Image: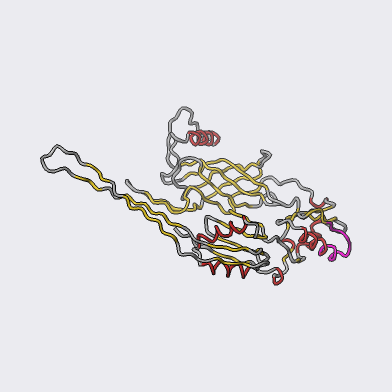
Amino acid sequence: MRIAILLICLASPVFAEPIRIKDLVEFDGVRGNDLVGYGLVVGLNGTGDGLRNSPFTEEIMANLLERLGANVTGEEFRPKNVAAVFVTATLPPFARAGSMLDVTVSAIGDAKSLQGGTLVMTPLNGADGQIYAVAQGGLIAGGVAAEGQAARVVQGVPTSGSIPSGARVEREVAFDFAGLTEVRLALRSPDFTTAERIETAINREFRRDVAEMLDSGTVQVAVVKGSPAHMIARIEGLTVDPESRARVVVDQRSGTIVIGEDVRISPVAVAQGGLTVRVSEAPVASQPNPFSQGETILVPRTDASIEQKPGTGLAQLGGGTSLSEVVAGLNALGVAPNDMIDIMKSISAAGALHAEFVVN
């Protein structure tokens, strides 16, 4: 099976537009927090958990009913309209009590579908075990399933869904942002050149040395006047020309190759070809004569062949080859798309590819 190759050429940084600092960095301390909870989805149309296979569903349902005043101790009930789920959400930075969050709901039992269900009030805990939000509401499932007595068809993932604005923040994360005396900027793609340009842009904006590059991924800014919030607002809008390492990224699953403009190749010769070996078995049954005492025998019939692809020749790539020349050289080889990734690997293994080679 051939894999379609999508070749993406990144634009040269010389012609790239300046990028805002807010799109290049994360501000230390300004981040979200993950929340998780365990609850029940009710109102399913017979597609819930089988309680014999998911005893935890029955247990949490009994506890919920008892808290609501219904005594079910010793009773045996096995509804099919209930499913146990995990509920996850992200508490954004500076979220205040009463703010609404989007939540994701995922079945953990053997429920077939969460379509049309309603999430019952579910506390959401942070990593410290404290409750920061409470989720509840109608579920929007991510797929659909239909089945009959002898067949079942599924499209998407009906056992997972979301509730937009389905959780309300009940507890705020304590963080004295206004009391900070310095703010650190963490680069999403660490690079010394980019960090130095960010430092220069900030110092030029404030007309004093308030920013200091600590390493390739961190720039520290001292709060000298006003609140940190006002200072960050000014920094976010500044623009710089980011730099990045020459990189070739290959995704073998999708057949995607991304090559940066700065990729260079030393003098190297590339030849492509291969052998195809085919072996097929077609045994023939040999029957004995009528009324004889013989037995039926399977006579083997094997067809074996070796086919060699026509030679594509030897392609010579000169020193300092640019991206456009690399692409032209690969096309000149006339290779199949699924061979292009192997050629890039071989060039990298030969030490002729002057770029970071990333394989996903």
Colouring of the image: secondary structure
**Image location of residue 5, percent across then percent down:** 52, 63
Point 50% across, 64% down: residue? 335
Quarter of the view holding residue 189? bottom right
Q: Nearer the viewer, residue 151 or 135?
A: 151
Quarter of the view holding residue 355? bottom right
Residue 19 lies, with reference to residue 80, above or below; the image says: below
For this orientation, the residue located farthest to the right is 208
Q: Nearer the viewer, residue 271 or 153?
A: 271
Total numbered labels placed on residues in the image: 0
In magenta segment, residue 206: yes
**Image location of residue 272, percent across then percent down:** 52, 62
In magenta segment, residue 96: no
Residue 299 lies, with reference to residue 350, above or below; the image says: above
The magenta-colored residue range is: 201-212
Q: Nearer the viewer, residue 279 or 139?
A: 279
Point 56% across, 56% down: residue? 251
Q: Nearer the viewer, residue 260 or 165?
A: 260
Image check: 116 left or right of 212? left
**Image location of residue 236, percent across then percent down:** 76, 62
**Image location of residue 64, percent across then percent down:** 53, 36
